[in-house]
Image (cartoon, helix red, strand yellow):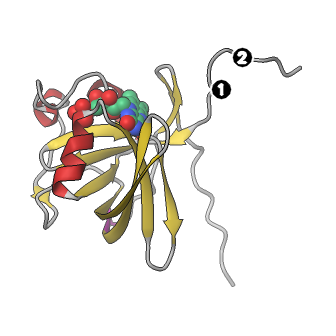
Amino acid sequence: MLIKQPTIPAQPRSTAILCCQKNLMPLSWHMPISREPFRYAIAVRDENITYNMLKEHGSFTLNFLPFSYHETIDKAGRVHGDSVDKLTFCNLVSSANDHNGNLILDDSDFVYECTIIDTYQNGDHTLFIADVTSTLTQENRIPIPVLFLGRGQYCTTTPISQIKMT
Ligand SMILES: Cc1cc2nc3c(=O)[nH]c(=O)nc-3n(C[C@H](O)[C@H](O)[C@H](O)COP(=O)(O)O)c2cc1C
C-alpha cells in the first residue's frame, strides 16, 4: 500500500564528482539535455563554494568514479572547499587538468569536460547548462555507477549484459 511520506522518497541517482578548478563536490542532480550538440544540466545550491566558483570560472569537469568510491564521495559532501583541500582530504588522485584548469580524477570510469553556456534559477538550486566539449573514458573498463538514494544510502547496478548487435 502506498502511504504519504514527510520526506522526498528515495530515488537512485547517478552520482559524479564535479571539479571546478582545484575544488570538488559530489553531485547527483544532473542530466543530459541535448545529444547534438551534447549538452548537460547540473543543479547546484548557492550555499556551496562550488556555486560561486562556477559563476567565476564558467567551466567544470564531471568525474564518474566507480562504486568502490562511494564512501569517499560521501566524505567529500560533508565539507566545504573554503576550509579543506578536498583532493587531499579524500585521498583522491588527479594527474591532469582539463584545458580550463579543472581537475580530472584519475580513476574515473569516464569524465565530461564542460563549458557553461547558461543558467536558470528557480527554487533553491540553480541549473547550470553546459556544453560537453570533451569526454574521456577508461580503456577496457565497464563502468560500475554510484547511485545515491539520499540519507547516506548508496547502491549500484548489476553487471552490464551486452546484447550482440546484428
Ligand atoms: C551523494 C551526494 C550528492 C550531492 N548532490 C548535490 C547536488 O546535486 N547539488 C548540490 O548543490 N549539492 C549536492 N550535494 C551536496 C554538496 O556536494 C556538498 O554540500 C559539498 O560539501 C559542497 O562542497 P563545496 O562547498 O566545496 O562546493 C551532494 C552531496 C552528496 C554526498
Where residue 111 sits, quadrant-wise, is bottom left
Closer-to-camera residue (34/123): 123
Q: What percent of the width, then of the height, locates residue 161?
A: 63, 58
Callouts 2 and 1 close, C-beta under 8 Å? yes
Q: Is residue 137 magenta?
A: yes
Q: Which residue is mark 2?
A: 5
Q: What percent of the width, then of the height, locates residue 99?
A: 13, 67
Direction from residue 94 to residue 2 in the image, left or right: right
Where residue 2 sits, quadrant-wise, is top right
Helix, strand or loop at mark 2: loop
**Which segment did they paint magenta?**
135-139
Q: Please say if 104 is above or below 90.
A: below
Please state which amino acid type lies under the numbered disc 1. Answer: Pro
Please state which amino acid type lies under the numbered disc 2. Answer: Gln
Find out if the beta carbon at label 2 lies less than 8 Å from the nearest ligand 1 atom: no
Q: Which residue is mark 1?
A: 9
Direction from residue 69 to residue 32 in the image, left or right: right
Q: Is residue 39 visible?
A: yes
